[in-house]
Image (cartoon, helix red, strand yellow):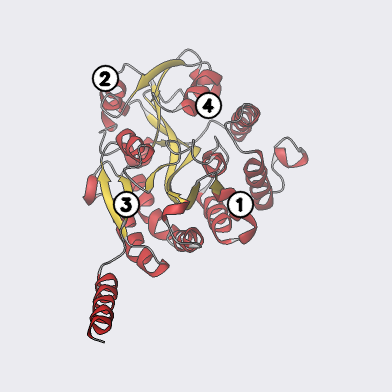
Amino acid sequence: MRPFKTMLTTLAAAALFTLSVPAQAASVCVYDPAGRTGFAYKWMEAWQTQAAGWGANVELKSYNDEETAVKDFDAGTCDAIAATGIRLQKYNRATYTVEAVAGIPNYTLLKQVLVTLQTNDAYDRHFTSGQYETAGIYPLGAVYAFVRDRGINDAGDFAGRSVAYMDYDKTSLTVVEAIGAVKVPVNLSTLSSTFNNGRADATFVPASAYTPFELWKGLGDTGAVVKYPLLQVTMQVVLRKDSFPAGFGDKSRDYVARQFDTAMSVVNRSEGEIKSNYWMGMESSAKEQEFEQEMQKLRIKLRDTGRYDPEILTLLRKARCYADNTRWECAQNLE
């Protein structure tokens, strides 16, 4: 009997040891240019705490270089990644399409779209693409045109002007080409000097770039920020589905949707740092409609070439027309 008792004792000890060892953590590459002190990383720390209740032990890895974060995710160093939608578009075209050019013209509509998408079961299928699942979309604010000359305030005024755009962002490149501007590719290390020193007449960036890149130097006494959202930047959380428990993505999206107002407080603070005298509207409502018509053509082109998801574009059009059924596009059925 003693060998049998010994075996039971050994098995019990092994079981106790197994229970005492935590499950292996799923790692998440988190891009934030400010590192662990940045707001995006702080959002993910709060998400990490919630993840324990969804059945996952999560470890965050900080990156202040987005390209490196994506490469590490591709290499399998991380089981998930939190980065901008434009960087993560190859993993899910549908969720990237919420950043469609001029697709969401204000933050009220942005909230409706992001909350509806992430909490309505009817849209769940749009969040999965192959082995990947988008587990949350945070708002990072609108991209605006920063111009060194206040005379540049609609699409036609950019023709022949030099525009700095992020060299990895093919959508921005398409926009620059569509408005007839001269292309000036930049990266995070050269954006500030290129715009501030006059090597570009304009650049397309979110308001959060104003302070860290000291863009007031480029705006000077003659520049302005055109207060029309060219597109909405987002931070998206993308998982390898097999690395997380079943149903994890649903719980995560529901949580992220409820963080919209918290995220927007950061966006509003960034926009508030831009001096009021720099903000400038388009010349007229007619000019604004003309711009929107050009952007519609561009969205359709990007849809037809496989860059944008057609169902999400349709959802965005319906949202715009539900909010304002007098819009010029509502009698059409082009998107």
The disc labelled 4 sits on which kind of residue?
Asp
Q: Nearer the viewer, mark 2 or mark 3?
A: 3
Provide the residue designation for mark 2. 197
> Upstream in the sequence, badge 4 or badge 3?
3
Q: Is residue 41 visible?
A: yes
Characterize the local packing of mark 1: few (<14), some (14-19) or many (20 or more) Cα atoms within 10 angstroms.
few
Q: In the figure, 194 relative to 306: above or below?
A: above
> Upstream in the sequence, badge 4 or badge 2?
4
Provide the residue designation for mark 4. 154
**Residue 279 position by quadrant:** top left
Q: Nearer the viewer, mark 4 or mark 2?
A: 2
Q: Position of residue 245 (x, y in %)?
A: 45, 61
The disc labelled 2 sits on which kind of residue?
Asn
> Upstream in the sequence, badge 2 or badge 3?
3
Kindly identify the residue that appears in the image at 38 percent across and 19 percent down: 185
Report the side of 134 relative to 276 (left or right). right
